[in-house]
Amino acid sequence: MAMAPSAATTADANGGGNVDAPELRLFVMALFFLFGGITSLNDVIIPKLKELFTLNYTQAMLVQFCFFTAYFVLGIPGAALVKRIGYMRGAAVGLLTMMAGCLLFIPASQSALYVLFLFALFILASGVVIVQVVSNPLISLLGPARTASSRLTFAQAFNSLGTVLFPLIGARLILGGIKDIKADTLTGPALDAYRVTESSLVVNTYIGLAISLALVAGVVWMNRNRLKGERHEVSSLAASLALLSRRRFAFGASCIFLYVGAEVSIGSVIVNYLSQPTVMGLTHEAAGGEIWKYWFGAMIGRFIGSAVLRLVNPGLTLAACATGAIVLLGISTHTSGPVAAYSLLAIGLMNSIMFPTIFTLACDGLGKRAADGSGIINVAIFGGAVVPLATGAIADATGSLTTSLVLPALCYAVIVAFGVFARHSVVPAEEAEVFG
């Protein structure tokens, strides 16, 4: 999943000078890898928890709702925290919060209560938000300014690598288990015991993540004083929200909301969708092993898109990719078998350039206020909470997972409109000064 530049990009990169520290760059790459992978791991635990707690689709999508609500709740406060304590200490706080969220899976499993799993996911996501607030601006500080965009692109590749590998490994670790027993056939103590036993597969995975996070946090803390003279520009929430009066920016921020929602919705239903007899009839474990292809398409598309966007108008490229996503959804929902399966997975390729392109087009012309714009867009990632929940509700109301995919299609349709609308660049960046 593409990660947003954060509100903390208001940091004065020249305040303490750029730091040429290869080991810190490796650390930031590890951050991108970790929070990208952890986010995509939700696609694996959704079908697991759905079966364990005999949930409908709406209830199962609460996983994504609780995870992405953290962006809405902590996006701006997280940036304020980083501005107050600095990048490295902020990263340490975020990593330790992520570790705490992972460890909360232990009492959640022992209690066999779904609500505690949701709480653990919210805490985990809160840490992800803080780490994300740090990562993008920090990578720009760790080396010459002229190569900052190259370093950020390379770091985003590690994010994509995490979204590919984590579901692939997680499917084997989490979606295995007792094949001849199902939660909906058990009651009372037998059901509780089954949930504790099966959820231990989830717990063991997240304990492993907690150990990794602790190691990375230790490295961060040992380097907490590496950035000298760090300064951050202070901006008010009201000033940031004033940017929404700009039609282009408001339209773009809305499309970030819709894009993240559509991307997460599709990723969340892959296992259950491929498990349908009319599609491929796979077991959950086998279907989980297909998720990586969705995210791999996004990773490959990012490299292809970086070249295409140098030659083709970004707005029209965005509109073309969103149209492609709608076409693939149409093919998937009106066919069966491998065609239905792989046309859905191929949407990852269409998604690849959407986030950075929407972000760039939305912030075009903001000038010095671009950092404030990135803060609002960081909050707009909350779409990953709302759209999947609504998709699940449609599936439950209609009794058809296929029908529910009309909602992501509508999201992409709005993105097509934005691409056409924003195809012309806002040349005079000085216009943004009226908001300063």
Image (cartoon, rainbow, N blue to C red):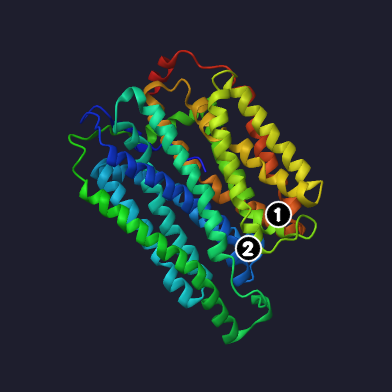
Residue occupying the far bottom of the picture? 189
In the rendered structure, which amino acid carries the disc numbered 2?
Glu
Could you say which disc has been placed on residue 394 in the image? Answer: 1
Residue 48 relative to residue 30: left or right: right
Task: Report the front residue among 93 and 272.
Answer: 272
Q: Which residue is painted at 67% across and 56% down in the image?
A: 393
Q: Position of residue 247 (x, y in %)?
A: 54, 26
Residue 319 relative to residue 246: left or right: right
Can you tell which quarter of the image residue 213 is in?
bottom left
Task: Report the front residue among 429 and 168.
Answer: 168
Residue 167 relative to residue 396: left or right: left
Residue occupying the far top of the picture? 428
Q: Is residue 261 visible?
A: no
Q: Which residue is painted at 43% across and 49% down in the image?
A: 35
**In this figure, which residue is indicated by the disc labeled 2?**
285
Mark 2: give few (<14), some (14-19) or many (20+) Cα within 10 Å. Answer: many
Could you say which disc has been placed on residue 333 in the image? Answer: none
Q: Position of residue 238 (x, y in %)?
A: 38, 35
Task: Report the front residue among 258 and 160.
Answer: 160
Label 1 SS? helix
Image quarter (top left, top right, bottom left or bottom right) of the C terminus:
top left
